[in-house]
Image: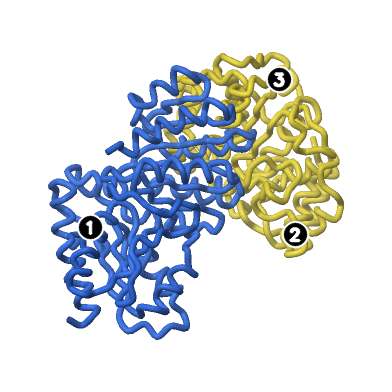
Chain colours: A blue, B yellow
């Protein structure tokens, strides 16, 4: 399965070929895979150094002279450390930027809390004129990036290290969710890597006669309220599975979208505190409820069985 | 020098009840000279693509920028009269989405300078010869992003970039071991020291600076006096963010009209 990070590099090469405004800046990561872009466009590639706030701030200058900056490094450093730069230099000044992260949530599980990032999605979503994407496959990234990179907004792409491996029948469009399975008993809403486990759980639940409507969101902001509202009108039960902070993520946006519906029960699987300790990504998932079994358990709890 | 602009700044602050008079007085001579003799611009077409860029990184000194933009035709009398009111476009820190001629929305210190570094890089990528000037406070040089961006500016050899430091002594109130000149030199910047209130020094230094697409970025350390021009405002006291009353306003006018 192609890694999203490799797709990022390939997409830069592909778009950089025709769009001379594209400038890529990295904070000392991914320089190996970006070498083809760097060699082809040496004046449009900069491994700036280890100074994320200035790197993001610098991109505002590029944007101001009409270039299209793409800034890439690890999620906590590009979003949480440089948030004031994103907020003021781009949000307040109405300048566009493309922010590409790796290491969202606990993808860098073995590196510990210093390299985790739970709040990135909610932070960027606070800026009205922004788009937040959590693609779960290489194809999704390529599609979403091409659809949005020059839309004049703040675009944040959180690239998972764990592609979900599910192929969609429906085409991917900015701002739209994908209905992976239709059902009337409960709605599961998820994003990024967790689609894999949600899909597996949906199949198991189907065998138990529990019909799950599984909605996958490669775009988290703007949030597809109408789509979620429509599903919850039918199921009245909500389970969200999100490798995000438990605040201001899929759960709260879905509940906002459910206004006017008498929701019977809602459960969230998310991150509500620092995740201490180490281990592999799967081990950290296991410790924090991001498992197929826990999704099934919560779904049955919602259904009252 | 520039007594008329200084009076205008104090009047704006007095009328609206908002503003930093001493911080504006320490830079107004520099900003006026840039717009009078150095910068290339079209006041009726502020986004002219061939313009030189000027960024006021120490956004709280915007009284000076507004007074100068008004003098050179970017702003109207009405804009100045409506300063810091809900009718106007001018506030206590500049908003580039509203103010013609303001290249960045500064205020939070440490943002305008890295933006200027980015503009200089962007212009080089686009193979353009526009020059970039950015004015920082010495206190602002406490911010980490200043040194991150200074490091980048030198490593990228942005010879189309000139920083001017308003060295009015604010920084040393808190951190007296500042070594500002040796720091900028250590970061690889071509360093010049001038009197920030001397027209002769301005003429001499700006005639000497060589801008090129690749080369050392330049920094001018301009020794200034905070509140320059009005004896009781000068220095680092209560006047930093104080609003003059009617009688103080009369005294300000009297001193400046001498």
Tell me the SS state at disc 1.
helix
Viewer-proximal residue among B91 and A238: A238
Q: CA distance from mark 3 to mark 2?
A: 34 Å
Q: Chain of mark 1?
A: A
Q: Compared to B241, does B4 lie above or below?
A: above
Q: Residue at x 37, y 42 (%)?
A: A101
Mark 3 on the same chain as mark 2? yes
Quadrant of res A119: bottom left
Q: Quadrant of the N terminus of chain A?
A: top left
User: What residue is shown with label 1?
Assistant: A197
Q: Nearer the viewer, mark 1 or mark 3?
A: 1
Does the image show residue B221? Answer: no
Tell me the SS state at disc 3.
helix
Q: Chain of mark 2?
A: B
Q: Compared to A38, does B74 lie above or below?
A: below
Mark 1 on the same chain as mark 2? no
**Residue B14, which numbered label?**
2
Q: Residue at x 25, y 61 (%)?
A: A198
Nearer-N-terminus badge (3/2)? 2
Tell me the SS state at disc 2.
helix
Q: CA distance from mark 1 to mark 2?
A: 64 Å
Mark 1 on the same chain as mark 3? no
User: What residue is shown with label 3?
Assistant: B206
């Amino acid at each position: 399965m192609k890694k999203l990070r490799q797709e990022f590099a390939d997409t830069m090469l592909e778009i950089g070929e025709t769009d001379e405004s594209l400038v890529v800046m990295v904070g000392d990561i991914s320089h190996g895979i970006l070498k083809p872009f760097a060699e082809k466009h040496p004046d449009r590639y900069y491994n700036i150094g280890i100074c994320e706030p200035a790197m993001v701030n610098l991109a505002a200058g590029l944007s101001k002279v009409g270039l299209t900056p793409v800034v890439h490094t690890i999620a906590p450093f590009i979003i949480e450390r440089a948030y004031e730069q994103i907020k003021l230099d781009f949000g307040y000044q109405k300048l566009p930027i493309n922010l590409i992260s790796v290491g969202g949530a606990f993808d860098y599980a073995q590196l510990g809390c210093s390299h985790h990032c739970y709040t990135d999605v909610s932070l960027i979503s606070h800026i009205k004129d922004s788009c937040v994407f959590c693609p779960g496959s290489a194809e999704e990234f390529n599609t979403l990036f091409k659809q949005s990179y020059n839309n004049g907004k703040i675009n944040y792409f959180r690239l998972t290290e764990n592609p979900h491996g599910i192929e969609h029948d429906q085409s991917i469009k900015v701002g739209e969710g994908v209905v992976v399975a239709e059902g009337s008993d409960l709605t599961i809403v998820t994003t990024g890597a967790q689609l894999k486990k949600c899909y597996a759980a949906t199949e198991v639940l189907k065998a138990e006669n529990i019909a799950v409507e599984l909605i996958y969101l490669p775009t988290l902001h703007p949030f597809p309220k109408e789509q979620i509202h429509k599903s919850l009108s039918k199921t009245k039960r909500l389970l969200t599975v999100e490798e995000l902070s438990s605040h201001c993520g899929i759960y709260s946006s879905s509940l906002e979208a459910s206004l006017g519906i008498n929701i019977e029960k809602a459960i969230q699987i998310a991150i509500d505190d620092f995740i201490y300790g180490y281990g592999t990504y799967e081990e950290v998932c296991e410790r924090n409820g991001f498992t197929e079994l826990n999704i099934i358990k919560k779904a049955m709890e919602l259904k009252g069985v | 020098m520039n007594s008329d602009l200084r009076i205008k700044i104090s009047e704006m602050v007095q009328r609206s009840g908002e503003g930093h008079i001493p911080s504006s007085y320490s830079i107004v001579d520099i900003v006026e000279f840039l717009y009078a003799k150095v910068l290339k611009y079209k006041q009726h077409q502020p986004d002219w693509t061939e313009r030189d860029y000027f960024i006021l990184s120490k956004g709280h000194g915007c009284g000076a920028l507004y007074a100068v933009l008004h003098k050179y035709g970017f702003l109207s009398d009405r804009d100045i009269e409506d300063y810091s009111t809900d009718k106007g476009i001018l506030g206590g820190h500049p908003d580039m989405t509203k103010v013609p001629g303001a290249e960045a929305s500064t205020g939070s210190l440490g943002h305008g300078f890295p933006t200027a570094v980015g503009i200089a890089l962007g212009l080089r990528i686009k193979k353009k010869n526009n020059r970039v000037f950015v004015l920082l406070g010495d206190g602002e040089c406490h911010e980490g992003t200043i040194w991150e961006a200074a490091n980048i500016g030198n490593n990228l050899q942005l010879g189309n970039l000139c920083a001017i430091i308003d060295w009015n002594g604010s920084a040393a109130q808190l951190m007296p071991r500042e070594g500002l000149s040796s720091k900028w030199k250590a970061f690889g910047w071509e360093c010049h020291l001038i009197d920030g209130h001397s027209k002769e020094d301005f003429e001499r230094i700006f005639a000497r600076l060589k801008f090129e697409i690749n080369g050392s970025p330049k920094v001018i350390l301009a020794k200034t006096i905070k509140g320059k021009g009005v004896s009781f405002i000068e220095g680092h006291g209560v006047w930093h963010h104080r609003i003059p009353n009617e009688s103080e306003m009369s005294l300000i006018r009297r001193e400046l009209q001498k």
